[in-house]
Amino acid sequence: MRPSRTLRFAVALIVAGAMPASAREVEGIAAVVNDQVISLYDVDQRVDLFFASSGIEKSPEMTERMRQQVLRALVDEKLQLQEAERVEIQIENTEIEQRMELLAKQDNRTLDGIKTFLKDKAIQEETMEAQIRAELAWNQFVRRSFSGRIKIGEQEIDEQYEKAVKAVNQTRYLVSEILLNLDNFSTEEQVRQLSGEIVKQLQSGVAFPAIARQFSIAPTAAQGGQLGWISADQLNPRLSQAVRQMQPGQISPPIPTTGGIYILALADKRAGGNDPSKNKFDVLTVGFRTDTATKKIEEFVSNFKTCRRAQSAAKKLKADVKRSGLKELRSLPAPVIEAVVDLESGEIAPPRDAGNVTNIYIVCDRKDDLGVDISRDQIADNIFSQRIAVMARRHLRDLRRDAVVEYR
């Protein structure tokens, strides 16, 4: 989320000059970006929005750190909006409202609920709306400007597909990421302090998706940083090493890479290959009372053809009949698992005594877990997202270099 109220530089100077010193501290100028103003009020509101939406505890030290980070983000957003306006990109209010509704849904709120939340925290709706406007405008600009330059060949997709197929048999990790942009920090000490504070807050229980949406510059930021199920080999070598050493529920320390500072969260991991416990079985259980003649039970088993006929025959014999429907093997009772685990669809298990009944288990249907579903289209989308994100960061770096930015 990234805002800014857009005031013209000259007007802001007149207004600021007419204010008493106390008012100027609140409504004064924080920075001027190519003759467009970012006010101190903009910075304060964005800082308040950050603390309110992330759940991070507010402290004087963290507030001061965030003011510096937020101001740099606002400068970037101003540059992004100026670039979008240059090519006549306009964001409609309906687009902003749709985005707010999506954010509300991700946080298990309604749109009215978010507006009430902002009001309770003394945050202007325009603060969030301005941030969303900049985000949408920049995304449109980036896609319009760079998507035509990205060419993804079939050979490249084939290579990534083969890697993904091999990864199915490796340990898989359910990972989320935050990527901090090094360009947003003026010193290494700022990087160390803020990344360390984020890790500390995440470890204390602050929601990872909220921090990812606020801070991350990775393409996954809009999804709360979720990378999904991946193998360690699909990650940068430093990230791969870190995730292999993590246990589910852990947050990594800050990991420096050439692309920025990463923070990872590991939600779960599982062995590679297919998971037999996730195979689905539709089991018909026929329970005969102990006083049922053994010969009748043996005839029932030998005459078995289909589940439908078995159900009809069992009812005539006044047996207890239950059908599970397709369920994962691990969700079935232990005696059922033991009886059917090696059976195929249409097979029947031998009778099993269970106290005062004799149970017969029949597999009416079976669907095996095929592991991760690998899509070539998804691979192509991932390559595209990574490349366009790199091009966007480079272009923003060029805009910073050529801009006239005066910090107050």
Image: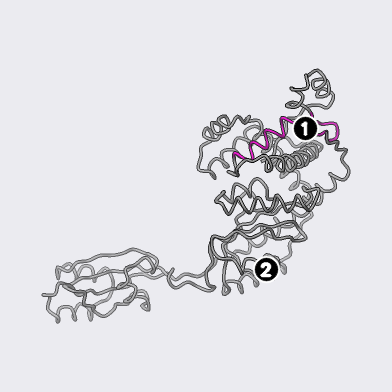
Quarter in which the N terminus is drawn: top right
Q: Eyeballing the image, is 25 above or below 217?
A: above
Query: In the rendered image, which residue does mark 2 sit on?
Result: 160
Q: Nearer the viewer, mark 1 or mark 2?
A: 1
Q: Eyeballing the image, is 126 above or below 180?
A: above
**Residue that lies at the very extreme toward the front in this rendered image:** 60
Q: Which residues are magenta?
A: 29-52
Q: Could you say where residue 176 lies in the image, as x and y percent from the top left?
A: 60, 57
In-image side of 342 versus 87 (left or right): left
Q: Secondary structure at mark 2?
A: helix
Q: Quadrant of residue 16?
A: top right
| Residue plotted at (79% across, 29% down) | 29
In the image, what residue type sits under mark 1? Ile
Quarter in which the C terminus is drawn: top right
Residue placed most toward the observer, 262 or 307: 262
How many other residues sit within 10 Å of disc 1, few (<14), some (14-19) or many (≥20)? many
How many other residues sit within 10 Å of disc 2, few (<14), some (14-19) or many (≥20)? some
- Taking the magenta stretch, the answer to whether it contains residue 36 is yes
Q: Eyeballing the image, is 209 above or below 308?
A: above
In the image, what residue type sits under mark 2? Gln
Q: Could you say where residue 266 lies in the image, as x and y percent from the top left?
A: 57, 61
**Mark 1–mark 2 CB contact (< 8 Å):** no
Q: Could you say where residue 4 lies in the image, as x and y percent from the top left?
A: 72, 33
Q: Secondary structure at mark 1?
A: strand
| Residue plotted at (78% across, 37% down) | 78
Query: In the rendered image, which residue does mark 1 sit on?
Result: 38
